[in-house]
Image (cartoon, rainbow, N blue to C red):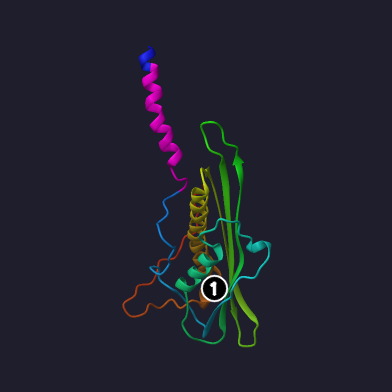
Amino acid sequence: MAVFTRRSGFLALPFLAACANEKPGPYVPPGPPSYGHLTPLRLKVGRLALQEPASGTAMLVEQPAPLQPADVMLRMAQDRLSAAGGPGSARFLIQTARLTRERAAAGGMFSPASETFRCVMRCQLEIVSDDNITLAAAAAEARRELTGPIHDDAERAEMAERVVKLAGQDLNVEFEFQLRSHLRSWLQLVAGPGETLPQPVEREALPRS
């Protein structure tokens, strides 16, 4: 019986180590996020303006932050939106780009402390006339939260980058859904040479981790 007990304890150690090294949440591709592989959302306007985010609590980003939420949102707008021609203009606004973290549980003798990382992204696209009158608008918001063990600053930075990427994925889906729901008449739904029209995005609850 003593031999069985020692062997069980020995076998449990690799299992516990593997669990501690698992990354919470779904798979996230390595490298900086990109949305260039998706069909652009063409707007029936002559100009497209991407407005830099202002300062304030809505833009609070706690360090470490290898990937800035606002940068991900601007990249999404650059990759997805384009002006197809027409009167007026479109204006992309970043309203919220927050990244915060807090201690979730204190560490013990055999386990590290855990931390919770939260990312909130909110943006709005406005259709503006030549007289600077807002004709239509659509807003999208995404929230992501990750909690996991943190051994050092490198893992802390990795977790922060991961939650921002996941929030960016969520926002991309929600953003297209809102545009097709509220700005459909402003979208050019005719495919260009050699292109196929994208399928409409169905809104669904995304998994939260």
The answer to whether 89 is drawn above or below residue 203 in the figure is: below
Question: Could you tell me which residue is drawn at 38 percent across and 25 percent down?
Answer: 10
Q: Secondary structure at mark 1?
A: loop
Q: Nearer the viewer, residue 182 or 92?
A: 92
Q: Which residues are magenta?
A: 5-25
Question: Could you tell me which residue is drawn at 54 percent across and 63 percent down?
Answer: 68
Q: Which residue is mark 1?
A: 183
Q: Position of residue 123 (x, y in %)?
A: 58, 67
Q: Residues within 10 Å of mark 1 (few under 14, many from 20)?
A: some
Q: Position of residue 109 (x, y in %)?
A: 54, 31
The extreme left residue here reads: 194
Q: Position of residue 204 (x, y in %)?
A: 50, 55
Question: Could you tell me which residue is drawn at 48 percent across and 85 percent down?
Answer: 85
Q: Nearer the viewer, residue 167 or 190?
A: 167
Q: Residue type at mark 1?
A: Leu
Characterize the magenta stretch by its predominant secondary structure: helix
Instruction: Count the marks.
Output: 1
Q: Nearer the viewer, residue 173 or 165?
A: 165
The extreme right residue here reads: 56
Q: Nearer the viewer, residue 107 or 15?
A: 107
Q: Quadrant of the N terminus?
A: top left
The answer to whether 60 is drawn above or below residue 148 in the figure is: below
Q: Position of residue 11 (x, y in %)?
A: 37, 26
